[in-house]
Amino acid sequence: MYLLAVLLGALVLVLLGRALYLQVIDRAFYQKQGDARFLRDIPIATSRGMITDRNGEPLAISTPVESVWGNPKELLKSPQRLPELAAALGVPQDELINRLSARANKEFIYLKRRINPDEAARILALDIAGVASQREYRRFYPQGEALAHVLGFTNIDDRGQEGLELAFDEWLSGKPGVKRVIRDNKGRIVENVDLVRAAQPGHDLALSIDRRIQYLTHRELRNAINETGASSGSAVVLDVATGEVLAMANLPTFNPNAVGGSPRDAHRNRAVTDLLEPGSTMKPLTVAAGLEAGVITPETLFDTSPGWMPNGKYRTTDTHNYGVLNTTGIIRKSSNVGAAMVAKRLTDAQFNDFLRRFGYGQRTGSGFPGEAAGLFPTPDRWSGTSKQTMSYGYGLNATPLQIATAYAALGNGGLLHQPSFVKGQHNPAKRVLEPKIADEVLHMMQTVTEPGGTATQAAILGYHVAGKTGTSRKASAGGYSRRYIGYFAGLVPVENPRFAMVVAVNDPDPSRKGYYGGVVSAPVFRGVMEGALRLMNVPPDDLDKWLAVQQAAEAKRKKVPSTVSAAPLAVGTPASAVARGVQ
């Protein structure tokens, strides 16, 4: 008995020594094993930077949401709870079981992501072992469809996928933090052990976009598409002095808050990706090239009779025989023959160098993802007819943004800025044309919106408007179809241009309003610019006309009351009808 007692005592001492060794002296192994079961490093979600317009109005914001996740190993131990969980998640029971079974050897699977915190709380209230939630953020776009193509959208992990969300993804994205916690067997956090790395929120981004002008552009473009039966359209508004993009709209569009339900083709930002033959919007640049080269003057006369001229085996034709036109008349009447006569006086090198200075055949430098460079072949690839057709906008391709950038340079005294989507971005200009020539061309373009011009529907009361219409036939296999693109490119006010705008209406139905740029696109320009001039408090530069109209309206108002009172009203005449008569 004594020997047995000594032996048992020795064993107890060995066990105590071993326990002391493992728990005090060399405890790393079992500590690691315990930590592996209960200690977790989990990410701390951080918000993406907010995108605002130039006035600080939010355009893209991140809102906190919850994502419910599960531990397949734990969940599959309690199959009787799965029907209840499936019902709470709103998914078929078989689908949930298949997803869990496929990851049976894993410890993490998302069950439902980016949901309302109240909904997540209802799921967690079921108290099912292996189900937990974590904080995430979801992007929200208050302007919806109106700015979808500019902003783009993010994916389920809050990473930019298109548009400026993609272009500035690194700047906008925050850096998630990490904290060390102890979880129980149900996945619940029992204790916060340590903050491994603090979360860093993303940087905010102030765009050059003006939310109000963007809304006007989207609204007017949509009205034009509906009225003309066109298949699509684009519009761009630039600040002439800085090159900042104030608005950019495209149709068809999509809802960035519910991307999954929209056709993929609707995501395309046509204003920077679609290549179009610019048509007659090229003529002011052709005239400017002739003036710079000294081969013409504003008073040079061109006999465009009989309304056409040969171009190889083809013809360059006008819609009418305009007879003798001066240089201004070429732009006012949009004469293809006149533009071709100007180009004929230029060498290939002069014409090529001039257009490349204005950005044709190269990206604008806006930094927008997927921007097209356009198509402007080098002179060694020109045929005998190329220069003549390019003088009035055929045989080369450009984006609406490229055209707007070139026109903004005309309005800026020959200084060209790269278009920018960021407010206040350093954007030095480069000289592409002498101020005197730019001013001469600008005043020639003013005649386009005055009586006798091709875009009287672009005129704005109280302001001189410079512009140019364009109507190009769409290319088809082996030639051109009877389908059209109607353009208007304009600047306002002429005396001190503030805005440059380009409108392109694609494939309008000729049986409605026609297909010419002066009737399908010019009204969009007028509708947007009237609002933009008022919003930006741009002073009128045509006060005489404005005062004359106001005086005429005042005189009419003074005469109307006596006219109304002279005619007896029928019994029951609505007050609104009386009001309309007075007005």
Image (cartoon, rainbow, N blue to C red):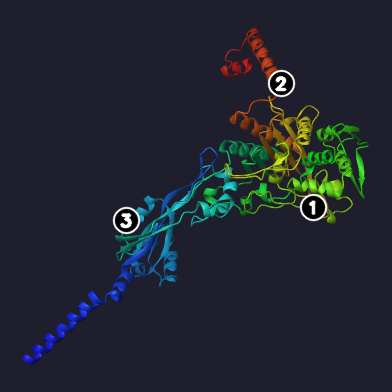
**For residue 545, above or below residue 564:** below
Q: Quadrant of the C terminus?
A: top right
Q: Residues within 10 Å of mark 3 (few under 14, many from 20)?
A: few
Type of residue at label 2? Lys
Q: Give the residue at mark 3.
A: 125
Looking at the picture, how far across and down is residue 381, in whole percent? 84, 56
520 sits to left or right of 171:
right
Q: Distance between the residues labelled 2 and 3?
A: 72 Å
Q: In which quarter of the image is residue 544?
A: top right
Name the residue at 26% across, 77% down.
26
Q: Earlier in the sequence, mark 2 or mark 3?
A: 3
Where in the figure is residue 120, as x and y percent of width and height? 37, 54
- Secondary structure under tag 3 reads loop
* The label number, if any, that marks residue 476 in the structure image: 1
Residue picked out by circle 2: 545
Residue type, label 3? Ala
